[in-house]
Amino acid sequence: MRKKLFLILTGLMVVFVLAACGTKSQDDVVKDLNGKLSDLSGYKANAKMTLKMGTESQVYNVEIWHKDPTYYRVNLENPAKDQSQMILRNDEGVFVLTPALNKSFKFQSDWPQNSSQAYLYESLIKDILEDKTAKFSTTKDYYVFETKTRYQNNKMLPFQEIKLNKGDLSPVSVKVMDSDRNALVTVEFTKVKFNANLNKSDFDMKKNMTRAQLGLPAMAKANANDSSFTVKYPTAKISGTKLIEEKDLNIEDGKRVVLTYEGKKPFTLIQEKVTAKPAAALVPTYVDGQPVDLGFTVGAISEHSITWSQNGIDYMIASKNLTKDELIEVASSVQGDMVK
């Protein structure tokens, strides 16, 4: 009897030891991620990003290249609208390119180090490492973290769920959530290649602009030379403020619409589309302001205004009454439904 009991207890101890060896704690995984970040020389990744800022979802194909320490190339493509934008960072600065319009904007900034970026692996690791109250769970194949975000408008998007493969700690998905845990931004990674072979020339602004323009579909080129567009209205509600006037203006090379909102916190929203400039006009426009991540693109924010481009249309919100968080909130919602 004693021998039988001894064998049972010994067997249970072996099971417990094996189980313990196969299970990593949150501290273990965080330590592994820190090591992964230290050894990472760069990567290539592909993902699908879905934005739910209104009742209509926007879907983007995202291609990410990163070469350590500060070279970035993020291509955002909306296949439904034949439109694309690219965010570049090299030794010269940060650029936002709109190939169909042959336009580029230049910033002097430390982007993307100053904010969360749902599609950048090292940014996700940084979010995990910096949040000492992060929640941790495991499934059969994945490690799952829920962390706070470092967005400039983190009141709107305060939380995120990050899912990583247990094998190589590669990203699987990211859900960026509002305060009610509703996922407003979802990134699903389809391919990740660590330590990819990348050169500095892969991040050259003119080279990338030329390559992107050569790959543009005919529809995108036609749309770029069409000055017509559908006016969009912000879905974010600013208490005590409403739309009182809408003006359509024909300008020399396109169309401009000015929306005027009045009330406790008045603001003006300008939407403008101009025909594409010839290739000879490829000179980056320096932007006075700091880059701000709107999810679908990088905009520029200053003390009293925010500007960005999407699907070939330039947007600007100007107000002396809106806070920076409110400027970002309204701007983020302009890509929602076309409702007044």
Image (cartoon, rainbow, N blue to C red):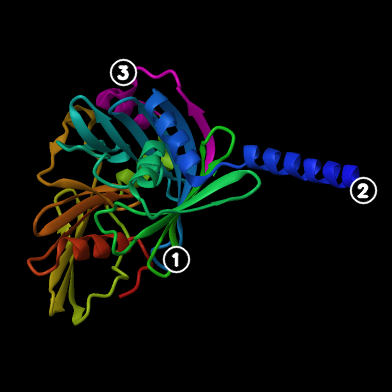
Dot 3 and dot 2 residues touching (CB under 8 Å) = no
Query: Which x, y percent locates residue 295?
Result: 34, 51
Residue nearer the viewer, 29 or 44: 29
- Position of residue 306 relative to residue 90, above or below, is below
Residue 84 can be seen in this image: no
The CA distance from mark 3 to mark 2 is 75 Å
Residue under label 3, please give it: 201
Residue 293 inside the magenta-drawn segment: no
Give the residue drawn at x 14%, y 67%. 322
Q: Mark 1 points at which residue?
A: 181
Horizontal side of residue 69 vs 184, given as left or right: left
Nearest to the eye among marks 3 and 1: give it: 1
| Membership of 194 in magenta stretch | yes
Q: Nearer the viewer, residue 8 or 157?
A: 8
Kindly identify the amino acid type of the residue bearing the numbered disc 1. Arg
Q: Residue at label 2?
A: 1
Percent across and percent down for residue 183 are 45, 61
Instruction: Specify the amino acid type for callout 3.
Output: Ser
| Range shown magenta | 189-214
Q: Which residue is drawn at 24% across and 29% down?
A: 279
Does residue 272 lie above or below 237 as drawn?
above
Dot 3 or dot 2: first in sequence order is: 2
Indicate the position of residue 310 as horizontal and vertical percent values.
Answer: 31, 50
As rendered, which of 306 and 10 lies closer to the eye? 10
